[in-house]
Image (tube, rainbow, N blue to C red):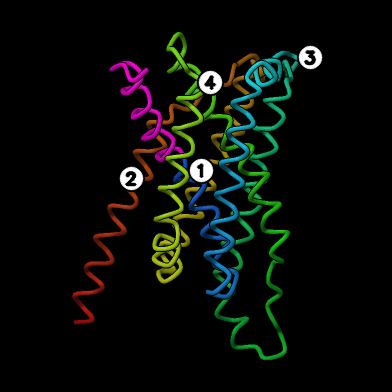
Amino acid sequence: MLTPEIIVAFLTLSFLEIVLGIDNIIFISILAGRFPKEDRSKLMRVGLFLAMIMRILLLTGVNWLTKMQTTLFNITTPLFTSNISIQAIILFGGGLFLLHKSTREIFHKVEEFEESNNENKKKSPISFSKALVQIVLIDIVFSFDSILTAIGMTNGVQFALWIMIGAVIIAILIMMLFASPVSDFVNNHPSLQILGLSFLLLIGFMLIAEAANLSNTEIFGASIGRIPKGYLYFSITFSLGVEMLNMQIRKRKKN
């Protein structure tokens, strides 16, 4: 069973799942920051475990996932045309949810100092169960990209399903191992929190554009193209690099 082709496919998919899971960790870390420290690790572990279950279920339902790409109905007007599918609806809804959630969290972070100085104005933390529901919903959206990529990469490879399931399990276990340190680091640096929320805004916009592209949407006769993910990852990496330099400069000034 352990042929070079299978080993390479497994290692590649494991790495890919970790990279594509970074946005998931950012989202969970932002939600975990609203809880007491003793509850953060529990929320992240449960959230990532649910992410693993969600991706395995999607992998075992490949045929169902493929059917979700078929067109449900068409919208045709002189100014707007689109072929709506279930997958496009989920991606569009997930993009709107990320835009809404990120905007609210940014507002909360900006206003946090004023609220903390007002004794009569108490912050109402999100409930644990509500946070888990939000994590599950966004897991569904984030899983589509990684699952469809994994299916494409393992097409024609022997034991493809078991390779994909194994890669998902390994990737989630590694993310569980580093989720708490990443969350603590992000929550201890407010500028990184705002940067992470800005990344989620970008991802939300990308999901909406992806949904429009999958639906072959045209507005005023112009089709909406797919945003290359390489551009998104480059902007995220570049922004993180600049912020790390700023953190080093601030640290040296304090010393």
Quickly name the residue at label 3.
Answer: 74
Q: Which residue corresponds to mark 1?
A: 202
- Quadrant holding the C terminus: bottom left
Amino acid type, mark 2? Thr
Mark 3: secondary structure: strand
Are the residues tagged 2 and 1 within 8 Å (C-beta)? Answer: no
**Label 4 is placed on what type of residue?**
Gly
Badge 3 amino acid: Asn
Q: Residue shown at 71%/13% (left/top)?
A: 70
Q: Is residue 221 magenta?
A: no
Q: Main secondary structure of the magenta part?
A: helix
The secondary structure type at the circle numbered 4 is loop
Q: Quadrant of the N terminus?
A: top left
Please state which amino acid type lies under the numbered disc 1: Leu
**Element at badge 2?**
helix
Q: Which residues are magenta?
A: 1-20
If you read the primary sequence from the N terminus, does the residue marked by circle 3 or circle 1 appear first? 3
Question: Residue 36, image x and y in percent?
Answer: 58, 75
